[in-house]
Image: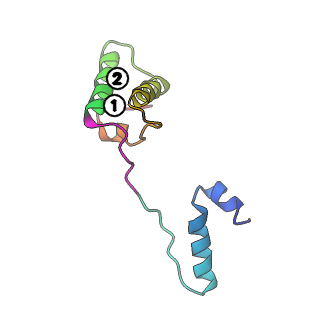
């Protein structure tokens, strides 16, 4: 496999692969382990609570939101905030909201 195709297939930055290959060629031992990082928050706490309240209210009314509906609602709120993306970590921080 080429160095160009490997980052696409394994979803890792090309620079990391080049760095690791360079170390291997120098005869050094490398450790390959995933590094967990925090996502940058897109929404302030008040918007997360708003999303949680809306999703909870709809579920309590007997019409729970699908994952797609929830993500579209979050995207619309982010768009109004002039944000381009929604942070994947938001549902993890709210134990009440579960996405299936």
Q: How many marks?
A: 2
Residue named by callout 1: 97
* Residue at point 30%, 16% (across, down): 60
- Which residue extends farthest right? 1
Horizontal and vertical percent position of residue 65: 42, 21
Q: In which quarter of the image is residue 76?
A: top left
Report helix, strand or loop for mark 1. loop
* Highlighted range, magenta: 37-45
- Which residue extends farthest front? 82
- Which residue extends farthest bottom? 27
Horizontal and vertical percent position of residue 56: 30, 22
* Residue at point 38%, 43% (across, down): 89
Horizontal and vertical percent position of residue 26: 60, 86
Q: Looking at the image, tell me whether mark 1 or mark 2 is earlier in sequence order.
A: 2
* Residue at point 26%, 36% (across, down): 45
Image quadrant holding the N terminus, namely bottom right
39 sits left or right of 7 in the view: left
Q: In this view, does 58 lie above or below 24?
A: above
In reply to whether residue 41 is colored magenta, the answer given is yes
Report helix, strand or loop for mark 2. helix
Q: Quadrant of residue 52?
A: top left
Nearest the camera: 45 or 100?
A: 45
98 sits left or right of 29 in the view: left
**What colouring style does the render use?**
rainbow
Q: Is residue 64 above or below residue 86?
A: above
Few, some or many residues within 10 Å of mark 2 (<14, 14–19, 20+): many
Residue named by callout 2: 55
Nearest the camera: 73 or 27?
A: 73
Structural distance between the alpha carbons of marks 1 and 2 = 7 Å
Secondary structure predominantly adopted by residues drawn in magenta = loop
Q: For the residues labelled 1 and 2, say whether their Cβ atoms are less than 8 Å apart.
A: yes
Image quadrant holding the C terminus, namely top left
């Amino acid at each position: 496999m080429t160095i160009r195709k490997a980052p696409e297939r394994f979803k890792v930055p090309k620079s990391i692969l080049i760095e690791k290959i360079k170390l291997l060629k120098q005869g050094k031992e490398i450790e390959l382990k995933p590094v967990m990082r925090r996502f940058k928050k897109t929404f302030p706490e008040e918007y997360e609570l708003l999303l949680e309240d809306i999703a909870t209210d709809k579920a309590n009314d007997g019409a729970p939101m699908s994952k797609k509906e929830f993500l579209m609602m979050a995207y619309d709120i982010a768009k109004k905030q002039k944000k381009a993306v929604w942070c994947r970590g938001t549902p993890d921080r709210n134990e009440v909201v579960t996405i299936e």
